Amino acid sequence: MHTSLKQWSMSLILAMSSATVACNPPEPIVPDEAWETGEAAQPLGPAACEPGGSLFAPGEISLPERSEYRLSISADGRTAYYHVDHEAPPYQTIYVTHLRNGHWTPGEVAPFSGTYQDSDPFISPDGRSIYFSSIRPVDGVLRDDTDLYVVRRVGSGWGPAEHLGPNVNSVRQELYASVTNDGTLYFASGTFDSDFEIYRSVRTRTGYAPAENLGLGVNSPDTWEYNPWVSPDGRLMVFATLNRPDGYGLGDLYVSYNRGGTWSQAINLGPAVNTEKDEFHPLVSRDLRQLYFVRQTWNPFVPSDFYRLDTRCLFR
């Protein structure tokens, strides 16, 4: 990555690190010009930066005999949801685990999952909702494509799954929801026979406005863009893409910045995280200090696992 782009991205993450901790973030702690010039960059400090990151929760969440996908961690860092692939129906199931005494408990099937093929859980910034993808029936009619759903907190449990409606869902595959403080929904839509691009849909009083494509800063007509993670304040996005010319492998992670509703030209996060393998399904911790992601090897096939990287390592 070019030095000026490194400074720009580093300044952005450091400047926003305190602004995204709360569900109602304060104003940015440095002006926009400092993000661009790198003037807000601060010393890296000591950090252990294993190339490509390190395996996350080995033997607890990341297990060698299965593939795990799309990790979502609560704001307090003590509860996590993810989905696991199975060879038997329903093929994909969402699990929940809790951090106790420094270790993650054995994953249990989430109370709203286990019957239909469910994937891609995302905990809303306020912790009151979980968004996910599923092929469960709509109005009693079975579907071949994947749609987006939400369950909402009811007491200490979760209410029934709600279909997000036709302004979000289509005859294509809708996957990998990410939601901001104001309820704006980001997700990928496309088909496996063509490509995927990233969309957003603004929350309204009655549901969601028609989904809009994020445009060429993020999307490209020649590559897949998918797996968006968007910061709670809606200003920072990390997403995955396939086979871009500046990529390091099959799938790479990129970053983009929202200024006035327009997403900037995406920047590859570089070799600290991206390898010749397939990296996707990003998650950034609420303080923006930890990047979590999935790494997959396809040839030969190796079950996917979660990895973690200190975000400061991206700019060494």
Image (cartoon, helix red, strand yellow):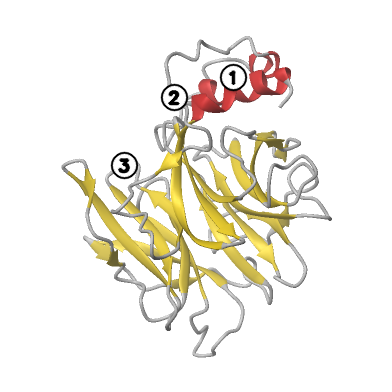
Query: With 257 as the anchor, is 295 left or right in this view?
Result: left
C-alpha gap between disc 1 and disc 3? 24 Å
Q: Which residue was labeled with disc 3?
A: 77
Location of residue 130 (image quadrant): bottom left
The numbered mark, 1 or 2, whose residue comes first in the sequence reads: 1
The numbered mark, 1 or 3, whose residue comes first in the sequence reads: 1
Tell me the element at label 3: loop
Residue 10 percent across, percent down from the top left: 59, 22
Q: Is residue 196 above or below residue 28?
A: below
Tell me the element at label 1: helix
Q: Which residue was labeled with disc 1?
A: 11
C-alpha gap between disc 3 and disc 2? 16 Å
Answer yes or no: is residue 161 visible: yes
The numbered mark, 3 or 2, whose residue comes first in the sequence reads: 2
Location of residue 112 (image quadrant): bottom left
Dot 2 amino acid type: Ser
Answer yes or no: is residue 204 visible: no
Query: With 197 as the anchor, is 67 left or right in this view?
Result: left
Residue 294 percent across, percent down from the top left: 50, 51
Task: Please state, as top left, top right, bottom left or bottom right, where the N terminus lies in the image.
Answer: top right
Q: Residue at x 63, y 49 (%)?
A: 240
Q: Is residue 116 above or below residue 238?
A: below
Dot 1 amino acid type: Ser
Tell me the element at label 2: loop
Marks 1 & 3, CB-CB < 8 Å contact: no
Q: Badge 2, how many Cα within 10 Å: few under 14, some, many 20+?
A: some
Q: Is residue 44 above or below residue 108?
A: above
Residue 167 percent across, percent down from the top left: 65, 67
